[in-house]
Amino acid sequence: MTSNADIVVNQFTRQAMPFASSAAMRDEDALRLLVEFSRAGADDTVLDVACGPGLVVAAFARLCRHVTGIDLTPAMIAEAREHAAALGLTNVDWHVGNVLPLPFPDRAFSVVVSRFAFHHFPAPLAVLREMARVCTRPGRLVIADMAASEDPQKADALNAMERLRDPSHTRALPVSEWRALFGQAGLNAPRETHYDVRADLDSLLKTSFPAPDDVPIIREMFDDSLVNDGLGMKTRRKDGRILLSYPIAILAADLAG
């Protein structure tokens, strides 16, 4: 039986280059918002969990003392190394490995962040607890991820579509579940901010690798969402293209000393 980790590595080995070059992933305004909302500073040491091609690591490394990225997929770490080298960053470090458990000692980083990764984790609470374990007191823990609708039917439809589009997808959570997850991990109620990731469907399909037979089903689901908002995201049609906006939530917990 194929494990979730195997599916993630397979998908993201293939996605490494298109993911790294995606306009939505490289959006400087979104990266700046993430760094600013974390309240990171020049003395901070940062860990990026499931760092992908190193875009978040690079954004923090421009400001912070040192940044470490860890990802399960070697191809993503290879992209990350190239990205950091092209920027001339020397205050970064990379690890290939799983996040359960994180291979770092307790309270090793003053800021622990993860962007667009939690919807791939089968056990998000366990990962959140690991992130809290390796975070200093005081410290900051920050997660950015797509936010599913609070309407259960729309949330289920979004997750069904995402699993077709990207088989490594597990489940996107509504913000109410994120708040509950922070509480279950023993963390303070998180600060929150929100924005949208905009893309068109054809570009989105080029950055993932659905089964060919599933592509017409995905398109049909988006066509249906244009009529009844069945996916719980903003969708519209322009010049024959389907344009969409994924709602993104950033949640940050400030850990007391």
Image (cartoon, grey):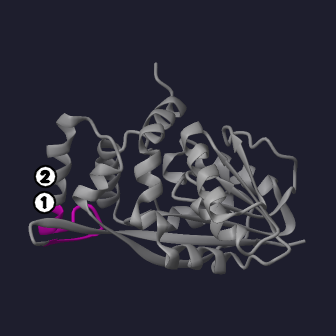
Residue type for callout 1: Asp
Q: Quadrant of residue 91?
A: bottom right
- Which sits in the foreground, 149 or 249? 249
In the figure, is residue 249 to the left or right of 212? Answer: right
In magenta segment, residue 227 = yes
Measure how far apart labels 2 and 1 are at the Cα level. Answer: 5 Å
- Quadrant where the C terminus sits is bottom right
**Residue 181 visible, this orientation:** no
The label number, if any, that marks residue 223 in the structure image: 1
- Above or below residue 159? Residue 182 is below
User: Would you say residue 207 is visible in this rendering?
Assistant: yes
Q: Is residue 155 above or below residue 252?
A: above
Q: Which mark is residue 220?
A: 2
Residue type for callout 2: Glu
Q: Is residue 147 magenta?
A: no
Q: Position of residue 33 (x, y in %)?
A: 57, 79
Badge 2 density bin: few <14, some 14–19, many ≥20, Cα 10 Å: few
Q: Which residues are magenta?
A: 224-237
Left or right of 181 on screen, residue 132: right
Tell me the element at label 2: helix
Percent of width and height locating residue 75? 54, 40
Disc 2, disc 1: CB below 8 Å? yes
Quadrant in the rendering for residue 246:
bottom left
Label 1: few (<14), some (14–19) or many (≥20) C-alpha neighbours in 10 Å: some
Tell me residue 256's x, y (percent): 85, 73
Q: Residue at x 65, y 58 (%)?
A: 84
Q: Residue lying farthest top?
A: 1
Residue at horizontal 77 percent and vertical 71 percent from the top: 64
The x, y position of residue 115, in whole percent, is 56, 60
